[in-house]
Amino acid sequence: MNDTRTLLDKLFLVVKGLCMGAANKVPGVSGGIVAFVAGFYEEFIYSLQKVNIKAFKLLISGRFKSFYRYINGPFLTLLIFGMLVSYFSVSKVLDYFLVKKELYVWAAFFGMIVGSIYYIGKDFGHWTKKTVPAALLGLAVGVAISFLSPARENDNLFFIFFCGMISVSGMTLPGLSGSFILILLGNYVLLLVDSVNALYDTFSEIFVGDFSFVSNAERLRTLKILVVFTLGSATGLVTLSHILSYVLKHYKHISTAVILGFITGSLGVVWPWKKTIFKEDGEGNILLDSNGKEIIINYERYLPDLGLSETWWAFFFIILGISILLLLDWYGKNRKRFA
């Protein structure tokens, strides 16, 4: 694919990468939705599919320019650069608000998921004897997961690699949030907050000539986790693009129905009004895992108290989350006016 983009086109592509990375980082929002409504989803999938055996042969034979052109390198480079920058910046923001304003963060996530359901379902008019049971199956699985005890954080490197493969699903499949799946797997904070922040802090220290991190066992452990997660993500990005292309081509309506049902049923996972239940010993002391983190065994969900001002602020953030998806929908319909 020949790349004839102007400097302004390339700048916009980096901005789109920023938006896509931010969306994939936020539970409930799919980076694929950004790609879809912004008009570069097909080129994104096409470029990923070019990372195949032929590309590998070009690479190992030393034909780097041919390899770069074959995989649509200029497009992928700018887009991925935007995603990486976004991951660092959004990670710091999320880390702060998850500690200071957890209710509002989950309220915004809840609204975004509601908006995602609307976005995926608004034009889906293919309810048949096959898609209805598929949607009900997805709904049942989502509801079941909502009432299960959340998975505990797991830093096993094979599991981290698997999480990496799964987490990029939101980039290749509009509507399915990879970060939301990481919440279900119990590794959202470890992989999309702690590990990214560790890399950010490491770069910041290196920039000022501080190499003390090499003697920080916890920092090195977290960086190793990030490396494995990144390798898993890269593997998943390429393999899923081929698998999803086949599935969407042959079972598009059934797949969409399953996703709609699953996301709807899983709303309970991100219900904003919940109290964390920690594992305790016989004396009421909260137990810690091997990494010194509190062990979560479940959540106690409750209805919002309308007499509290923070409840109404939470409603505001739910509406804000929905509005973000509506804005993406509006942009998708009117993007030609901005071209």
Image (spheres, grey):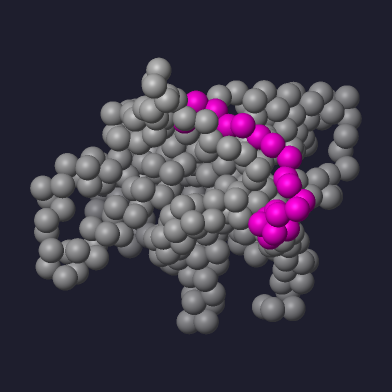
287 or 339, nearer to the observer: 287
Taking 157 as reference, is 111 above or below it? below
Please tell me which residue is depicted at 52% across the width and 82% down the height of the picture: 8
117 or 232, nearer to the observer: 117
Residue 207 percent location from the top left of the image: 19, 69
Which region is colored magenta? 296-314
The answer to whether residue 96 of the structure is visible from this angle is: yes
| The residue positioned farthest toward the front in the image shown | 283
Residue 9 percent location from the top left of the image: 54, 77
Q: Locate the C terminus and report the quarter of the image it occupies.
A: bottom right
The answer to whether residue 53 of the structure is visible from this angle is: no
* 145 on left or right of 91: right
Q: Is residue 302 magenta?
A: yes
Please tell me which residue is depicted at 42% across the width and 25% down the height of the picture: 284
| The residue positioned farthest toward the top in the image shown | 282
Q: Is residue 139 magenta?
A: no
* 29 on left or right of 315: left
Taking 223 as reference, is 11 above or below it? below
Please tell me which residue is depicted at 89% across the width and 30% down the height of the picture: 128
Residue 47 percent location from the top left of the image: 50, 54
271 or 55, nearer to the observer: 271
Please tell me which residue is depicted at 72% across the width and 33% down the height of the picture: 265
Label count reads: 0
Q: Quadrant of residue 131?
A: top right
